Image: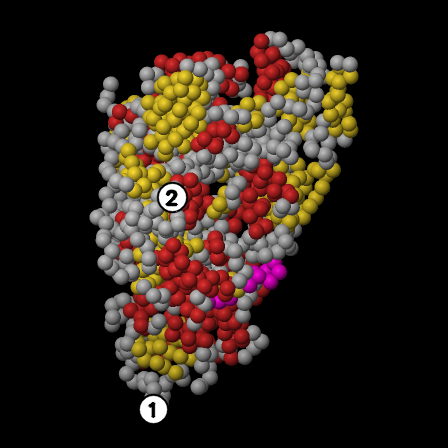
Amino acid sequence: MLRPKIIGFVCNWSKPPEIQTSEPSGFEGHPKIHMIQVMCVGRIDPVIVLDAFVRGADGVLMVGCPSPDCHYVEGNTQAKFKVKMLKKLLALAGIKPDRLLLDWAHMTDVESFVKIVDNFRNLIIAMGQSPLNGGDSSDDFLLNLRAAKNTASDFRLRVLTGREGELTQAESVYGETIPANDFDRISELLTRMEFIRHKIHLLAIQEPVSVKQLAERIKEKPSFVLCQIVEMRRRGMVTLDEIKGTTPLYKGLEV
Amino acid sequence: MAEKIGSVMVVGGGVAGIQASLDLADSGFKVYLLDKSSSIGGVMAELDKTFPTNDCSMCILAPKLVATGRHPNISLITNAELVDLKGQAGNFLVKFRKRSRYVDEERCNGCGLCSQKCPVEALDTFNEGLSNRSAIYVEYPQAVPLKYIIDREKCIGCGTCEEVCKAKAIAYDQQDTETTLSVGSIILAPGFEPFDARVKSELGYGKFPNVVTSIEFERILSASGPYGGLALRPSDGEVPRKLAFIQCVGSRDAQINRDYCSAACCMYGIKEAIIAKEHVPVALDCTLFYMDIRAHGKEFDAYYNRAQDEFGIRFVRSRVANITEDPKTNNLHLYYVEEEEPTTEEFDMVVLSVGMQPPAEASKLANIFGIELNGQKFCQTRMFSPVETSRPGVFVCGAFSSPKDIPESVAQASGAAAKAMSIIASERGKEIVAKEYPPERDVSQEEPRIGVFVCHCGINISGTVSVPEVVDFATKLPSVVYGEANLYTCSQDTQGMIKEKIQEHNLNRVIVASCTPRTHEALFRETVRESGLNPYLFEMANIRDQCSWVHVHQPKEATEKAKDLIRSVVAKARLLKPLRRPVINVTPTGLVIGGGVSGMTAALELANQGFDVHLVERTKNLGGHLREIRYTLEGENPREHLDSLVTQVLENGRIHVYLDSEVAEVNGFVGNFKSKINSESGEKEVEHGVVIVATGAKEYVPTEYLYGNAPGVVTQRELEEMLFNGAFKAESVVMIQCVGARTRERPNCARICCGQAIKNALRIKETSPETDVYVLYKDVRSYGFKEKYYRKAASKGVIFVNYNDDRKPEVSSDGGKLKVLFWEPIIKEEITLEPDTVVLSAAVSPNPDSKRVSEMLKVPLTKDGFFLEAHMKLRPVDFQTDGVFLCGMAHSPKFIDESICQACAAAARASTILSKKTLEMEGIIADVDEDLCSGCRICEHLCPYSAIEMNEKQTKVTAHVLEALCKGCGVCGTACPTKAITLGHFTTGEILAQVKAALVEEVRA
């Protein structure tokens, strides 16, 4: 694949017809990224984006229709919520959130589409390759990204992200609207907790580990790690494996 | 006078409220049990084990929770608060607000899917914040009612729970409702709150992660708690090796305005230390820092001794001044003074034994109910009316009236129930419905179809035994058509589920593989019965106490053993036959043995309930030990109360008093006793339905310290008499505590002597302040509100000097001059005093007649010679023998108010029997095949209960079982030469099948 490795998810209704996605065309301004066409950016499951990063993508671009022209009315709004959450997860994973961009284009405006792509490509070139593609701690980044991916497939976070629009723009079941700041606070906390738990889970699946070892590995306080272990035992993500001396070891369970 | 109402409102659903509700409902009154939280259970549900028996708290509470939840005459009103009270005793109008749950209780089936899917987390308050729960939750898995509730503060209203709820129970638009009910009387049992340890900032709670409170530590120790029952340090999840317990945090601390003792902490501290040692895989050092060990309850000192001797727990008499933390290790440095030497010691973890304080809503309750609180905002009661509030018709029990432990709360709860029902006794039975069972299914023509329910018991079983493997094994056994696993088979929702499965799979035998039948069999039999099966078509396999607990380190072998146990019980279950429970009539009369304050109170309470009572007293006077009490610590006039009590008893037309008399013989059984009362005037036979033992105790006659040999050596009782008569004069007095108590022969505490000594010392100081008074003590046990009199005595100049068994005081007499030699531990010197009087705080001895009474009633005594109740924690005034109850000093030493509580409690428990016209007896009894019987009479001789009589029919004499007397031991049948006797539910065929199945190894392959 061409370097930098950039995947572009482009909406069927915002990509100018002049631009091919699969084959090179004669068009001069053909963007030098790998484009994957979808019907709507709203369809991009966060898991897919994270999977791209897990597989070594240096950047992921998402292009959709600008508001209020979304072909599917709200697909672009939903994409916004997902990208917001994804950027949080990327940050937690130690990946610069700017490696993911959601932008808008009209199918009639080839120029600005090409500009979006080129700018993003230049940005990625400037940032350098993904830490997964070399460097000392690529293993750590891989672990982080896998944890982020598992987090994005977790029921709770998906529910919360899926309901962001409804809760912050329309009404909750109690007929209230939740201020966006409040929602962000709740969602940020949940994202962080779930991410850490999934990271612990991945580590504990490799081999039984202690709270102290985990704390050192993920650079959190042991007391905080213990709280996560308590919650993870409750949910059946880890179980007590054995007690070595005064140290309980926990192993991850397949979930 | 307004019309009376035959229903009672109980406020507070902890163990006290539950007990009061059950007693009331079982005696024919409708009960509304209101709790502010979403389920009942209170603090007891949070505890791991209970002292001094180390019973699992939830295991003994759960059957009561379920019994309360399914009782047809108890309505649970949860998540509610009181708003207003109008009216008077006998006819109150209570207004309460039921806060919205946002869940329809009628529809919610407790499946828990909502909670699994809820995206919002909150701190789990049931686990004291040591773990998380969802915004929609139940407090704990066995919660009653098992109805979910939305934490509206945390809920973001995303609507997920509504979407996943199959029962359509989510009701976001549910509103708070206000309801007014008419009730005849009210019982307040709102319990207590643990002291907020942050107030004692020098101890570091809230700052240092490894400083936890005792209630948090209960959750840590609990198998269903956050750490799965393993003691761990919150800072790093490591198992501690060195643990400190600090007593009196928020108790006995005048600086923070807590001048009382919380009474239960010494014992729970010792218990937590013992249990912690059992809950860690390494050697654990436990040290308990205390001021006085207050092990004043029944058999408590024996427990304390075991903690030292068997478990090696170190006890340090010192108040810890300060705690600091090593920020690197999170270990804790404790600063304290031991034997006058400032010391620092490092520990891995510290547990603060936090005291009890009144519930936050105490003042609000007091306002609504118009009741008086004491200076510490506990409910005000009096020595001679310990369950009455200041408002007639409103009664109190549990820790709201004073800090106390579980058995005392339970006794007081039954006592409050007695008082609550006596004012509406005329309305008994008017507001209730009879429990109806479906018609019993005839299974005699069916092949056995067995259902096996295997309990995880949280992780108590599943932590060791592979439950899925066991279920899989069980379902493949012959005749087993259904098997499943439950998190807690005893929970309320599982009962409903078992009933469904019985219908769905047409089961005709049910097996629960879980804990012990001792606590849970009755619960499951009831469930089976509610589904239309005979209750004896049920069996239990004990795969916890006898399997997972004893083989905790051998999971593989334990799993195999669990299978063996289940296979064996399945083999028996195939042969189970329905049994009939004989029904007997009840004589609505009581017999009370003993005419002291307890016996008189019990008799009066029964009479007030509308039952006749025979009250038998050995001496010429009613009053017993109370006659010797001249004044009380709290300043009441005992003689006035005694006279009034005697008058009430003598003038009550329902009470038949027998003075100078003795119960010589008790025959019969619950509901139908026939007894002989002997007196000088001859023998009289009486019939009665219950017996209450109130035979009291007496002051121990010391053989120590020259008592009886030197005129200046007297007992506290003798001193009290002298003080009362104004005949006491002395310049110097030495009191010696624990004379004949806490010794090798009598290891337990006599409970009342510290209070007596303080009372008499204060009296001396009042009349003659210049008299020197020394009290030589082992531990000053002025528990509860008595603590403030201890402080008062100290402030009046009474000198308290500690001694221990290694250096007991010595008393000598030199030509009539008394000398007392003792070690003064603070100045570390031997001191000799020459007091005018040496006062011995003599122990309490059991009534010498107890042994005879125990044999006559076939009820047990403790090693110390006091009567032994059915269960030390939850059945304090019952005997194992149905229909026989106990109260007062016959049970163990206690103060007047405590005796009165128990006496009322015994009356309440008795009235659950006397209020019924008929009783259902146990169905597991012997049966004689008259055709086979040879009339040899062997069985008649063998039966310890005289339950077999020989009947002559035509020409043949055959044995006949008196159903109500038979206890179901089966001894008769084992000797029968013609094998004519069968014991139901334990037939030879059934037992043989169990043995055979247990020993068949190849079945496993």
Q: Which residues make up the magenta segment?
A: A242-253
Q: Secondary structure at mark 2?
A: loop
Q: Residue at x 42, y 49 (%)?
A: B974
Q: Residues within 10 Å of mark 1 (few under 14, many from 20)?
A: few
Badge 2: chain ID: B
Inspect the image, locate mark 2, and give the three-letter code of the amino acid beneath it. Cys
> Mark 2 — residue?
B936
Q: Position of residue B61 (x, y in %)?
A: 42, 44
Q: Extreme top residue here?
A: B726
| Residue at image coords 71%, 41% | B343
The answer for how far apart the CA atoms under marks 1 and 2 are is 116 Å
Give the residue at the far left of this rendering.
Answer: B439
Mark sitting on residue B503: none
Q: Residue A39: horizontal and vertical position, in percent?
A: 28, 76
- Frontmost of labels 1 and 2 is 2
Of the numbered discs in the image, which one, if any, rests on residue A26?
1
Task: Determine the residue positioned at 61% across, 58% down.
Answer: A246
> Which residue appears at 60% of the width and 12% of the height?
B723
- Assign the C terminus of chain B to one quadrant of the image: bottom left
